[in-house]
Amino acid sequence: MRVSSTLFFRTGLDSINAQQSDLLHLYKQIGTGKRLLTPSDDPLASAQTINLSQSQSLNERFSENRQVAMRSLGTAESTLGDATLLMQDIKTRLVEASNGTLSDADRSTLATVLQGARDSLLGMANARDGAGQYVFSGSKGDIEPFQQINGNVVYKGDQVQRLIQADQTRQIAGSDVGLDVFARATPGSSAYLTRMEPVAGVLPQGTGQMGGPQVQDVGHSDYGKALSVAFKDDAGVIKYTVSVKDPATGSSVSMPDERVYDPANPVLDLSTTNANSSPAGAQQAMVKVSFEGIPANGDTFVIEPASSPGYVSSVQAAPGSTLNVSSSRITDFAVAKPGYTYDLEFTSDTKFNVIVRDASGDEDTSQSMTGLDFIPGRENTIDLPYGMQVKLTGTPKGPVTGPPLVPGDKVSIVPNETPTDLNIFDALDNVIAALKGDVMTDPSQAAQFRSAIATAMQRTDVVYDNILTVRSSVGTRLNELESLDANGAQRGLGYAAEMTRLEDLDYYTATTQLQLRSSALEAASLAFRRIQSLSLFNQGQG
């Protein structure tokens, strides 16, 4: 093989260039402190750093989300703490107001105090967080939740909590629904409440007053339904009739017997007829309530459950079906249609149709749906038109063609026609109005005053307990966020350590390589000079 002078020169130059390139690369690594300047430096490590970088970004995003949630929930917790103290003061004032020795001037002063407390509570219900969002308006953070309309406080938010992605697999509610805080009983509450029932716009005119109810039988067939007690004067004998209110229709079913009121026996007989037994028979009263005073003809009082949903649902189950309704509620009041009803008719074990009807009973064909899917054996959340949501569990059954023909399961969702009003602001407004009345000279108005105080105290107790429950829920969520934040911080440290291991430069190794590369460059330069001296032209000159 013939080795030319050109090959000698090219080999020498290539060697010098390679050493200079390696040395330049080392200079860049040392200058940046990074081992990976290009993917070719370590393809596997480069791919790993890309994945780690994405994981770091997500972890940082979740951390920011948690901070947003903690700020919002911190505002809610502080507000609910203030509301708790204020509700305790309101309860104390109501006890003071029930003192029969107070003069009308004293009651007027208490009315002023309660008016201030009521306005302060309304301000807390309309609290904003640091971002200017209303805390208790559900998902509508830009809408004031409780608004004064025609003298009444009306809720204008929705019933959807703002969910924040706090971790890869965890969403946490960063807000609460105002109705679930200031106008609801604690979920699962078995309490009953009493109130006066106006007849033709007129409150009871007698001196009768109903005491606080005590639940006797939660397994009663009428448990969860409201009762009404109507008094009448029958030739000087005071009698009363007990009626059961159907929440689905709003109609009342009166018990067939009239009962005699005995002022010496303060406990009313509230036993009802079991329509499901054959023959029908009287059941033990599901609730016990005392009564004092002399009612007037036509005076009516209501005993109603503290927990009362806005919609009620029922299942007409086919043989072998285990279908059950977990809940049905309005999630968006902005699009809700008052009086609308929904029927879910199963055409098979996995398919159903939805029939929507307006308040007059006519089908809304534009919103009815067919062929919807159902997954048996698990909870199915079904979003229906006009903001309605229903959750179904179990295994349904479709129709059997027969013979005989057996219809499939049918779920009916209708408005609750007898909802319990737990709006704390309405209860306080009624008490304030009663405190401003003349109760010293009018026995009837004095009885109305005592009933209004008793009604307000019952509702205040229920709402107070519920505020404590919501506050506990907020605290639980804050604790979970702190735990997730600690885990996220630890995870971030792990990501950073792994990124350092993959990317960062080992300066000890790099400086050693720098010395080696410098020596190699010097050797290559020396070799090139020796190659230059081997030229034939140089030999000829010698």
Image (tube, helix red, strand yellow):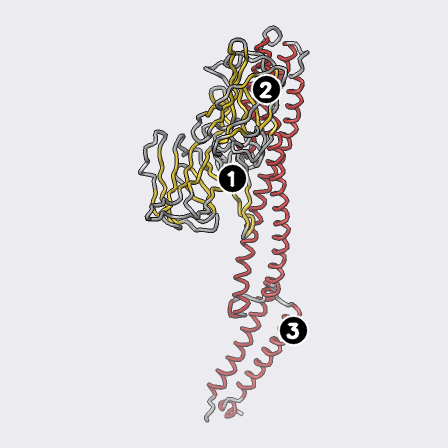
Q: Residue at x 56, y 53 (%)?
A: 59
Mark 1 Cα-neighbour bin, 10 Å: few <14, some 14–19, many ≥20 = some
Left/right placement of residue 412 relative to residue 434 reads: left
Tag 2 near tag 1, CB within 8 Å: no
Q: Looking at this view, name the residue that lies furthest to the left.
A: 365
Q: Nearer the viewer, residue 522 or 415?
A: 415
Secondary structure found at label 2: strand
Amino acid carrying mark 1 in the image: Gln
Of the two numbered discs 3 and 2 in the rendering, the one whose residue sits closer to the viewer: 2
Q: In the image, residue 4 lies at what x, y percent?
A: 46, 89
The quarter holding residue 293 reads top right
Between marks 1 and 3, how big is the CA–CA gap? 60 Å
Residue under pointer 1? 161
Q: Residue at x 51, y 41 (%)?
A: 162
Residue at image mark 3: 512
Disc 2 marks which residue?
210
Res 111 visible: no
